[in-house]
Amino acid sequence: QVQLVESGGGLVQVGGSLRLSCTASGSIFRINDMGWYRQSPGKQRELVAAITSGKSTNYADSVKGRFTISRDNPKNTVYLQMNSLKPEDTAVYYCNADVVSRDYYGMKWGKGILVTVSS
């Protein structure tokens, strides 16, 4: 069974940095697009950044220049380096991947990890 597990969240002060990681496990043949989404209380889940298998990237305007998404294909892992964090970056961050495995193909989500930016 394919699973995505996020790590690296926590509490950080304004202007600080965090690095999120998400690793996919299972009988995976291939992972196409991977991405990070976030959801704050009372708001809809929104795309933060996405990366293709060829490592082309896309970012939300609110994080351009501050966040960097990357991936390690052999490790089935995607990262989100977050710098110059702001209080409005506080949210639960979810990893997402388009997976092809032995018994599943389609989008998979992680359970989410909390990032809190304190002022």
Image (spheres, grey):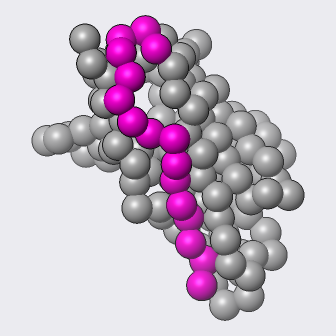
Instruction: Report x, y in % for residue 72.
Output: 79, 48
Dividing the picture into quarters, in which one does residue 14 lie? top left
Residue 47 appears in the figure:
no
- In the rendered image of this protein, does residue 75 appear above or below residue 21? below
Identified at 56% across, 72% down, the residue is: 3
Q: Closest to the observer: 65 or 25?
A: 25
Q: Would you identify the image quadrant in which residue 46 lies? A: top left
- Magenta stretch encompasses residue 23: no
Q: Which residue lies at the image location 48% right of the left edge and 63% below the top edge?
A: 109
Quadrant for the N terminus in the image: bottom right
Q: Residue at x 74, y 59 (%)?
A: 76
> Is the residue 94 above or below the residue 60 in the image?
below
Q: Position of residue 65 (x, y in %)?
A: 58, 13
Check residue 8 for magenta coloring.
yes
The C terminus, quarter of image: top left
- Left or right? Give the position of 55 relative to 91: right
Give percent across and percent down for residue 67: 56, 23
Front residue of this view, candidates 102 and 60: 102
Furthest-left residue in this view: 42
Count of all numbered marks drawn on residues in the image: 0
* 52 horizontally vs 115: left or right: right
Q: Is residue 76 above or below residue 28?
A: above
Residue at image coords 51%, 41%: 8
Q: In the visual, does 28 lie left or right of 42?
A: right
Specify the segment rendered in magenta: 1-16
Q: Please indicate, yes or no, whether residue 55 appears anywhere in the rendered image.
A: yes
